[in-house]
Amino acid sequence: MARISFKLKLVFLTLIMLAACFCGLSIKNVTAAADSTPVSEHGSLSVKGSKIVDKNGNTFQLVGMSTHGLAWYPEAVSEQTMKTLRDDWNCNAFRLAMYTEEYGGYTTSAENKNSMISRIDKGISIAKKLGMYVIIDWHILSDNNPQTHKAEAIDFFKKMSSKYKGCPNVIYEICNEPHWVSWASDIKPYCVEVIKAIRKNDPNGIIICGSNTWSQDIHEVLQNPITGYKNIAYSLHFYANTHTQWLRDRLVNCLDKGLCVVVTEFGTCDASGNGGYNKAETDNWMTLLQNRKVGLFNWSLSNKSETASAILPGTNLSALKAGESQLTQSGKLIRSWTRRLGRRTGQVTVSYANTTNNAVRIVTNRTDADGYKIWISSSKSFPSGSTRLAKTYSNSQTTVRFDNLANKGGTYYVKVQGYKGYTENGKKMYVYSAPVVKTIKLAPSVSKNKIKSASVTSNSVKLGIAKNTSADGYKVWICADKNFKESNTRLTRTSSNSVVSFSFANLARPGKSYYVKVQTYKWHNNGIRKQAVYSTPVIKKIALAPNVSKNTIKSATVTQSSVNFSIARNLSADGYKVWICADKNFKDSNTRLTRTSSNSVVSFSFANLTRPGQSYNVKVQTYKWHNNGITKQAIYSTPVVKTVKLAPKVEKNTIRIVSSTNNRVDISIARNLSADGYKVWICADESFKEGTARLIRTSSNAELDFRFENLALSDHTYYIKIQTYKWHNNGITTQAIYSEPIITTVKTKALTADEFAA
Ligand code: IDC
């Protein structure tokens, strides 16, 4: 039977879920996040040897301005000004200088302490909003020995680290500029205690320690660094007109020996902050810091009338504008450097990959990049011979394909770098992000499967495929077009390995040919994502069932427990299937009988039925053999179903009087009110066979007397048979149902001598 078994509801749900997974195969266009920031790109920073590195492990140079004292110039801590620093100056960080003992400083009164804390909080919230790194600077200065306010420092950093633990923006600078004390016995012990307090709350945030002589004596630190804690850095401060090559040499030596140094404060002038502007020495310092990627913060983001100030006196510090118009000569020089050093390079990652056994398609996800470069190689070191520089792409193209890779099913490496273009002195130049290298595993080959069987109706197909134990599942297609491109007639199913039969119903082109396609798939982790890998497809043409015209049930005769019926012959059919059942859905197996016949058999008998006198249902279907392209199957017509009523019981009658002469018999029978009539036989022989002087009368119910005259034999025993009958419409044919016969005998008289003579 080509009836589709729909025990597949659960399977259906599974298929829908799987189909959802497969949507991942279509390429998503991942657009660059518009609001990428330094922190969103670089994340949590950490100390690695002498370098600060970002979340990807790439060296990261902090570039920013330091505020002047928060007590004097709080208005610089504004979103607008910091945004200008970020977007026009390319600063990725700023420093909040909170004096401890000077005017308005943290330790000078409870009121000042609270106002300092709220200014720090404000600065950090701006830094978070703008995605900039921020240094909390415990700015000791006239309090030359950090031990002086150690208790307050510990309390302050406890509060800060508890509030900002895990915040990637925040960097702790715990003593600005100790001087006239000892690293070993004053500064270092202080630092260790503050570090301990911070680490209780914040296990990873970078902590920067000052050194003796206004944070110049990092060589002393190198001899006796703080151990047992990670992410500890040291500050070096310089003022370009005071501290020159000798301090640069010291820095280079310390860096070479692995000390992590950040220039958390520097000026372009004398150490006093006023006078002695020195561009040449500033350039020397900046060139070194650029080469060694040492973080730097310029003193200061203020409009105070002194040489170190970056902003012209009278400028609204809370609304710094882009460009140079509000800048001092120091500010202009510093901006020209930060614009170069802090350039955003544009981040690129590989967000999606799809492989075959010899090709890769990659989708990149970029933030802030103008474009990207991409390489592929079978070697992780990308040697020139095996390295392919695929192309430099503009931002609009997110997908790159590498085809015909030689190492089928092997491992490849993909390297991407984002770039941003800048114009400098009228010339276009590009800055590249650190390379991101990903491992890509090409797809294994997946062996194809077999289509084992198919059964069709005029508008449905059910397929059975072989189970492929090494596969994770199958994808099955049906389409009127053999290229499976015609979407109106195309249907697909995806199943797990255990599902090997697939049903497609309500097909749009009944009776026509379709194509079916089966692909085995396996899940494959290509290094970027889990994808399905498909076998080459197996495609077969399949012919839907032809129309088979139904037949008619022509006649039926029944008894109390049997049915005989005849059907019309269908010359175009190959045969018939006939059913009988008490249940009109033909489901009751106790009363169900079936027969299958070839075309020439048109009458069917069902005897010994178990429900005498009851109704039965008969069903007839014509069938034709059909080769659907995969399987030879019988196609059935729509069924013809009729209800057939078995015969009722008909009561037999009684004979009232029988009399005879020598050539005549008279029979009188009792009337049977429920009968439609009687059949009466007389015969010279008890066989009641023709040729044995048999006479038959059939009467209606009203006639009760029967005379049989001119009988041939006198003095002979004649046999009499009587049956009552009733008309019965069995549902197909009206027929007479007869009672059991009553049989008796009568003897004709012998002839008298006269009669004999006559
Ligand atoms: C100076 C300021 C100045 C202020 C003074 C307060 O420029 O306006 O009056 O502090 O004491 C540092 C210090 C830093 C100094 C700066 C210039 O960290 O606080 O700022 N300097 O003298 N170390 C070396 C130089």
Image (tube, rainbow, N blue to C red):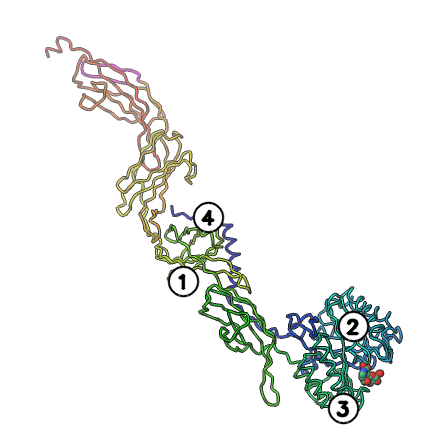
> Which mark's residue is nearer the viewer, 4 or 3?
3
Disc 3 is placed on an element classified as loop
User: Which quadrant is the N terminus positioned in?
Assistant: top left
Residue drawn at x 69%, y 72% as measured from the top left: 49
| Ligand 1 contact, mark 1 (Cβ < 8 Å) | no
Residue 615 is left or right of residue 333, and the answer is: left
Q: Which residue is mark 3?
A: 277
Residue wearing tag 2: 224
Residue 631 screen position, x and y as percent: 35, 50
Residue 659 shown in magenta: yes
Q: CA distance from mark 2 to mark 3?
A: 35 Å
Q: Quadrant of ligand 1?
A: bottom right
Task: Label 1, secondary structure: give it.
Answer: loop
Q: Which residue is mark 4?
A: 6
Mark 2 packing: few (<14 Cα in 10 Å), some, or many (20+)?
few
Instruction: Mark 1 vs mark 4: give the one in front.
Output: 1
